[in-house]
Structure formats: structure tokens, C-alpha cells
Image (tube, rainbow, N blue to C red):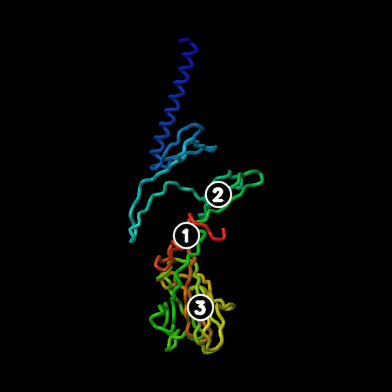
Amino acid sequence: MSETQHEQDSIGRRGLLRRASTVAAGVAGAGVVGVAGATPAQAAAGDPVIQGATNVVDAATTLRNTGARATLRLQNVRTYDDGPGGEVYAEPALQLMPSGTTLSNLAEAGSMGMDVEGNIWIATRGGSAGGNDRHVLHSTANSNRIVPLVPQRVLDTRYASSRGLVRETGYLDSSGRLLAGRSISLRLTDHLYCADAVFGTLTVVQPTLGGFAQVYPFGTTRPTDFSSINFAPNQIVSNAFVCGVGRDQETGSWATDLISIYTNRTTHVILDITAAVVGAGRVNPRSAMPVRANRIDVGGKAAWE
């Protein structure tokens, strides 16, 4: 072996030893992080990722795969049972750290991030001096859907068995009619859980005088400048409505899915529901339309096509 080759081999071995000592020190530091809160590991391009430690880099890391399977697979196999319903919870395999109020206007297409309010953003067009296209991903936290219900009657003051009111004493007369100038509250938890709004039909039956009735969210101040229905004396008349759903947070009961009904004239009232707006909430499967009624047969074709 020539003297030059010997010198090069010595330099290479010293470099490997230095690199090995750096990795060992980092691994040792990773074990100390949880105990003493060590400073982040300073990583250069090509350095290994030190698990259990914060790795600081100044450039993007690219994983490239030429095969058909996923380029990156994250797995957390830990689960635990909790809750009265026997739910099995999975530990997260990925965390997006909330930061800022939106995604950077220079983020590349396909970039994702979470803002401090919990909204997940994605860039659909690459960033440049002129900015990019950024959109919030829809989830149960920031969007909702309309769920059709089997049309059903939830209130009929003509029959005591069909009232189900949260408060009744002092608001109805001896025949069950809603007294003029009073509001009653109706709980819909037999059908909905933490819904955002409900669609339905309000009917008044033989009011004593002409007037109006309102359906409005429970827990809010009753608006005075709108009506859900207007009626004449002794009429039986209906009208559709959409109403936000409220919660009872003042009495300590934490009751959900409440709406209120007001009339300025004494009358019987009937309320039917036909659909609900839900995000994080749910609909009782027994109240919802069958799933098959909401799906398209992908093997079929519309007549007008």
C-alpha cells in the first residue's frame, strides 16, 4: 500500500469514528431528553434522525419510493378501551403541530399544516412571489352535513303524551294550548345528539286570534323581528322552518339539542322534523333515513343520461 493510500484510509477511518461518536452522543442525549430536557439535536444533511429527540434541520427531507407501496408508513399499535360504549381508542401515528393563523403563502403544492385554531390547511398550487392557493380541509370541526330524517312528529300540544317539553307548567292552558306571550322548550335528544340545526314544519291549530309564532334556538334571546308562521283566527296552517339547536348550560343539566317555540296568541302547536344539520354531532340511526336511500348505485345510470 502506498503512503498516499495509507493516509487516505486513516482520514476515512477517523471520519467514521467521529461520525459514530456523534451518533452515539445523540442517542445518549435522546435518553436524557425526557429527564433533563436536553437541547434539540443539531442535524446536518445526511445525519440520522434521533428518535425521542427534537431534530433541527434547515432544509426539507425527501423520501422517494419507486415502488407501488406507500413511501412513508407511520404506525402506532397502542390502543386502549374507554367509555361506556366500549370504544377502542387508537393512539395517534402522526401529529401536526399547530402554528400561526394560516399556511405560509410560499408553501409548495401538497404542503399541509394546522393553525392555532385547529384548522388543517393544504396548498394546492405551489408558492412563489405571488403566493399560492391555500384551502381549509373540511372536518366535523369546521363543516357539517344535512342528514335526512324519517319525517316524524315530535310535538303536538293537543295530546299530553305528545308534548315532551322541558318546561310546561305555567306555559300551557288547561287544554294544552301554548299561552299567548309564552315560550316553551322542546328537547330533541331522542333523535339528535349535538346537532347544529334542524329542519321541520310548524303547524298552529285554531288560534284564538290572528298572530304569529316563532321557532328559535334555545338559550338565545328571542328575536322580535321575525316569524316562522303567520296565522288568522281559528286557522289550521303550517310552514317549514330551519332552526339552530341550543344547549342548556345555565341549569347545570348540560342538556343538548333544544329548540324553543313562541306564540303571541294562545294556540295549539304541532312540530314535525324532517332533517338535521350535524358536524361533530350524530343522528339516531332509528330516526335517520336508511343509508341505502342516500347512495348511488355505481353500476346504474340516471334515465336522463
Across and down, in percent, residue 291 comes to 43, 62
Q: Amino acid at mark 1?
A: Arg
Rounded to the nearest whole Å, what is the CA distance between mark 2 and mark 1?
Answer: 28 Å
Q: Amino acid at mark 2?
A: Ile
Across and down, in percent, residue 82 comes to 34, 57
Rounded to the nearest whole Å, what is the CA distance between mark 1 and mark 3?
Answer: 29 Å
Q: Residue at x 51, y 76 (%)?
A: 215
Which of the two discs, 3 and 2, sits closer to the camera? 3
Residue 173 is at least partly visible in this image: yes
Q: Is residue 64 left or right of residue 36?
A: right
Total labels: the figure holds 3
Q: Earlier in the sequence, mark 1 or mark 3?
A: 3
Q: Amino acid at mark 3?
A: Leu
> Tag on residue 122?
2
Q: Earlier in the sequence, mark 2 or mark 1?
A: 2
Q: Which residue is mark 3?
A: 202
Q: Which residue is mark 1?
A: 295
